[in-house]
Structure formats: C-alpha cells, structure tokens
Image: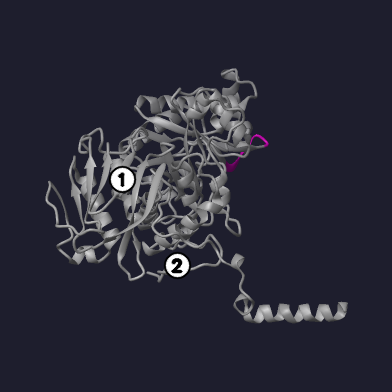
Amino acid sequence: MAAYTKVFMLIVLNFHCVFGNSQLPLQDDFHGAKPTRGEPWPLPQSYTPSAETFSLNYLSFEFRVTGSTCDTLTAAIRRYEELIFGERSKIDNRLKFFSGSQRFSSADGSVNSLSVHVQEACDTTENKYPALESNEAYNLTVASPDSQLVSNTVWGAMRGLETFSQLIYEGLDGQFEMNKTVIQDFPRFKYRGLLLDSSRHFLSVDILKKNLDAMAYNKFNVFHWHIVDDQSFPYESVLFPEMSAMGSYFGLSHTYTQANIKDVVEYARLRGIRVIPEFDTPGHTQSWGKAIQNLLTKCYTSGKPNGNFGPIDPSVNSTYDFLKKFFGEVAEVFPDHYIHLGGDEVSFSCWQSNPQITDFMKKMSFGSNYAQLEQYYMQNLLSIINSLNKGYLIWQEVIDNGATVRPDTIVEVWKGGYQKELAKVTKLGYHALLSSCWYLNLIAYGSDWKRYYACDPWDMVNGTQQQLDLVIGGEACMWGEYVDNTNVISRTWPRAAAVGERLWSNKDVRDGTKAAPRMAEHRCRLISRGFQAEPINGPDFCEHEYRGV
C-alpha cells in the first residue's frame, strides 16, 4: 500500500505543477477576504451605517460650501469631484460647487448635494499650513436629499471629503449608491507619518506626489522626507550648490531643485500633509563631505590618515559655522515647525582613531566616553535649531546616549524592544513617535499587513496615562535600499494603510480578521484611483483591475 500511495502522490504533485491550482478543487480558504462595499478606511471613531440606500446622480449632485472658504478648500472639492465622478466631472458643466443657498430640486431616495461647512477661517497666515496641533475632526451625515459635512477647520473638511468619497460605491446596474450613514470622527493620534528615502534611490517628483495622494486617501498627515544620506545628496542648496553637484547620483536629473521642493510642499499642503525633512547628522553624512572640506572626521590607521572618513568632526568651530548657515537655509525652505535631525547609528571608531579628536576629548574632560562627544555635537546642533525658532525630531540614540534636549523634543523610537524604549522616553518627559514595527521595506510573504495592524504606539511596559499621552503617534517607514520609482508605490500600498488605520481609529479597533474585508475593498479602491496597490490578502480580484499606465 505504501508504494501505491507514493506513486499516487507523485501523480497528484505532477498534475498540480503542470495545471496549477485552477485544476484542483477550490476551497474557501484559497481566497482572500471578500471586499465590503462602501465602507471607509481608516474606520471612523463613530460609524453608524444603515441598510437604507440612496442613489447619487452626477448630473444633479453638487458640493455646496456654506461656511468659510479658501483656495485650499476649493482645490480639495475640485479634486473630489474628479475623484468621485472621473471624466464626467470635466465634461458636464452641470456638476459644480458654489457658495450660498442655491439648490437643485431633489427626488426621494437620492443624495443631491453635500454641504461643506468649515467654521474657522481657512485663509489666515496661521492656518495656511497644517501643523502638529491642527484639528482634523469632522462630522458627516449622509441623508436624502442633502448630506452635511461640518468641521472646525479645512483640514477636518479634507478628511471628511475623503470619507464621503469612500462611502460611494457602484451598484449592480453601474449607478452610484450610498448608504444612509452618520459619522463623528477624529484622529486618535495627531502625528501619522510616512517616511520615504530618496537618497539610496532617487524618487522623482511625480512619484513623491503620487505617494502624497495615497497618503491623503489613508488620512496620513506627515511626509517624513529622508532626503539625503551617505549614498547621495539630492537636495539643492542655494548657499552650498556644490553639495548636490558633487553629492547627487547624476547631477541635475537626480537633484531636487528649490522649485521642486516648493512644488512638493505646496502639493502636500493642499492635501493637509506636513513635509518634515530629515538631514541626519553627525553620521550618515558621507555625501556631505564630497563638497564641504574638513567637515568629516579623517580616519587614521597606525597614526596616519587612511583615506577614509567618519562622522562629522565635532571638535572644530568650522563645523558649527557651516551647520548654522546650512540649517538656516533649510528652515526657510521647509515651512513646517519641525526638522528631523537624525542622530542615529553614529560609529565611534573613526573618532577614536583621530588624534585631533582624542586631544579634544582630553581638553573637554570627556575621558574615553565618545557618547559624551556625540552629546556635545548634538547639543550644539540643537542650540542652532533653537536659534532658528524651529522644533526638532531625533532618533532614539540621542536620548540613549544621554543628550540633554528641549522638553518639546520629539523622539522617534525605531529599534527592537520598543515597549521598554517608549516607557523610557516618556518617563523622561519627552514626546515619542513609534516606527519600530512599521518598517515596510522589510517585506514578508503573505498578509504581513496584519502584523503592522496589530502593533500599537500604546504598547509600552508599565506606562502610566501621563506617559501614554506623550506618545503623539508614529510612522511607517519605506527605506530605499531596494525601492525606486519602479516599485515604491506598490511596495508601500496598501500595506501602509494598516498603519494609517492604527494611528487614526479607536484603540479597540484591533482585529485584523475583521478588518480584512474593508482592506480588500480599500485596495480595490486604490487600484480604481490609479495605484499599483499590490495584493495583500491572497488570491482575489477587483471589479476594476489595474490596467497599466
């Protein structure tokens, strides 16, 4: 019997290899989650849908602005007109939005308008850019014939418009439909970020903009732009143009000009997204040293320079003269209050080999504590940033190495054992961000998004409520060693959406299995909006598959 069984198994395996799964009996667990219809991602704080269904006719539907208005709101409504109705919004002049009380005649069972009421002025200097303290709350009621979206700020209106667009789905006859729904919504965390790395591989402005669109569709509000690193320096400095000329991969074609950066910042602003640049020092600066002489530490072997360079040299005044000028420019180019200053992965070996550095250590009575030397550097840099009236973010090593920083410093926790690190940072009284469990570049076979979905910024060891309140959010990170323009969108989305819901929705929304059908719909939604959003729930399909560019 054993021999016959073995032969039978070989026949089955060969049949499987030749003809594939489609030739074998199908089982339910061969398929991914069945997509929902018209359910939002991320899940609102209070979401009360009804079985009552309304139609939505693009020929008669209109957005009605009944409160404050400004260019930001006007642009947002125009975007959502086109997003919801596609090409029809461009060719039919009956689809429009306007201020005032004009109304189309309505019919029962249809949604004919959405009134958008922003209570606070949105065209003031203070409200021009989104900020850490921006209010993104909104209330949305979908009813017939008129629906309502109310928010204090334009940023909340943007989030509400996104939710409204997600509640619309295609009926069996191809018509637009919505369910009667009442939503009261606001983000759980005020910092919901996504890091992209444009130094290991250059990312085009068009790709950065496409990613910003995806961020808006998932209610992220911070683009952490890791713009330079050891490998390349694509940031164009007005004061030090030789840095990009000598440090970028391939000249101007692989450089972000001042006009490019202004374009990206404005594109993000119109979507309620902050742009926080990262200029990581004193490590990760090899590309800086190609243009700025005597900035990096010379490494020594047997008492002689060996031709290699280490981190920025913290022992000379010229370093801080340069940093003051450079970051003074950065502070002008990027309007957000915060700059990410890095401070991670500083190797001490080159400092230890350099006789000038060791002499400086003796002079400063640092002994052999090179962490204290790093602290000296960081505190000088932080003083420079303070003088520019900017806030700063830092990686956790700065705190781990004992640096004294301002009380309003934001510390990003990225290493393993983050539960203890979050407890440590918040016990010291600092604000904290979590990214440890959301490194999207570390891909895994299968539905790895559920692992991201399960991680929470409040998962800390013995944290008090006061400590939990100091955790202001987190961010997903897509490091660039193995991503470029060809795959950064598909590798990031929709996996980053899991982080988006974790940072927006109620803390009790934790069940990945329950979330999977909505994630399946959301992936199809992103595909219908032109994104190469990769499969994440196993074998399935979207009604409107991605057809290419």
Residue 370 in percent (x, y) is at: 61, 27
Picture quarter with the N terminus? bottom right
- In the rendered structure, the answer to whether residue 190 lies left or right of residue 517 reads left
Provide the residue designation for mark 2. Answer: 542
**Mark 1 or 2, nearer chain start:** 1
Residue 469 in percent (x, y) is at: 48, 28
Which residue shows up at 81% across the image and 81% down it? 7
- In the rendered structure, the answer to whether residue 380 lies left or right of residue 350 reads left
- In the rendered structure, the answer to whether residue 341 lies left or right of residue 180 reads right
In depth, the one of 505 and 82 nearer the eye is 505
Was residue 303 drawn as part of the magenta stretch in this picture? yes
| Above or below: residue 246 compared with residue 170 | above
In depth, the one of 179 and 523 nearer the eye is 179
Please tell me whether the stretch drawn in magenta is mainly helix, strand or loop: strand
Provide the residue designation for mark 1. Answer: 140
Q: Is residue 220 visible?
A: no
Was residue 43 drawn as part of the magenta stretch in this picture? no
| The disc label shown at residue 438, or none | none
Binning the other alpha carbons within 10 Å of mark 1 as few (below 14), some (14 to 19) or many (20 upward) gives: many
Where does the magenta region start and end? 302-308
Which residue shows up at 30% across the image and 63% down it? 176
- What's under tag 1, amino acid-wise? Leu
Binning the other alpha carbons within 10 Å of mark 2 as few (below 14), some (14 to 19) or many (20 upward) gives: some
